Image: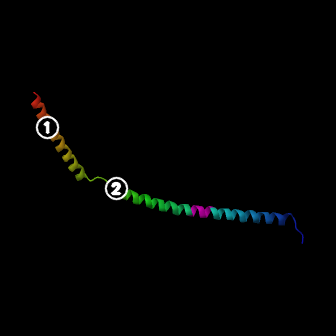
Amino acid sequence: MNFGFQDAFNIAVAIVSVLFGYLISIVKTAVHDLYHNNREIADKVHALEVFVADQYVKRNEVKELAQALFKELDRIEDKLNSKQDKCK
């Protein structure tokens, strides 16, 4: 059996090709895993956005709070005015 330069070159190219194919396989698997992890994270973020949007204060709740606050402030103002009238 005659082992020449061409045979050595063919074996070297085959080994490099196998290693490159293995590297491509590893990268493909990593990209696939990252894609699925990204999809899961995107779904969780979407669920969180829906949850946060649902927890906003409603407009009528703010109006009720403002009315109660202004009512209390008016009561305090009336008390201050009555004390001021007594001091004069």
Measuring from the top left, give residue 47's x and y in whole percent.
40, 60
Seen in the image, is 51 located left or right of residue 15?
Answer: left
What percent of the width, then of the height, locates residue 85? 10, 31
Q: CA distance from mark 1 to mark 2?
A: 41 Å
Which range is magenta? 27-32
Q: Tell me if residue 13 is in the magenta stretch.
A: no
x%, y% of residue 13?
A: 77, 63
Image height of 87 relative to 38, above or below? above
Question: Magenta includes 31?
Answer: yes
Q: What kind of element bears circle 2? A: helix
* Residue at image location 21% in from the left, 46% down from the top: 66
Please tell me in which quadrant of the rendered image residue 31 appears.
Answer: bottom right
Residue 79 or residue 26, whichever sits in front: 79
In this rendered view, identify the residue nearer to me: 34 or 8.
34
Q: Which mark is residue 79?
A: 1
Q: Nearer the viewer, mark 1 or mark 2?
A: 1
Indicate the quadrant containing the N terminus: top left, top right, bottom left or bottom right.
Answer: bottom right
Return the residue nearer the eye: 82 or 41. Answer: 82
Three-letter code for the amino acid on which mark 2 is drawn:
Ala
Q: Position of residue 28 (x, y in %)?
A: 61, 63
Q: Quadrant of the C terminus?
A: top left
**Residue flagged by tag 1: what amino acid is it?**
Lys
Which residue in the protein does label 2 denote? Answer: 53
Q: Which mark is residue 34?
A: none
Q: Quadrant of residue 80?
A: top left
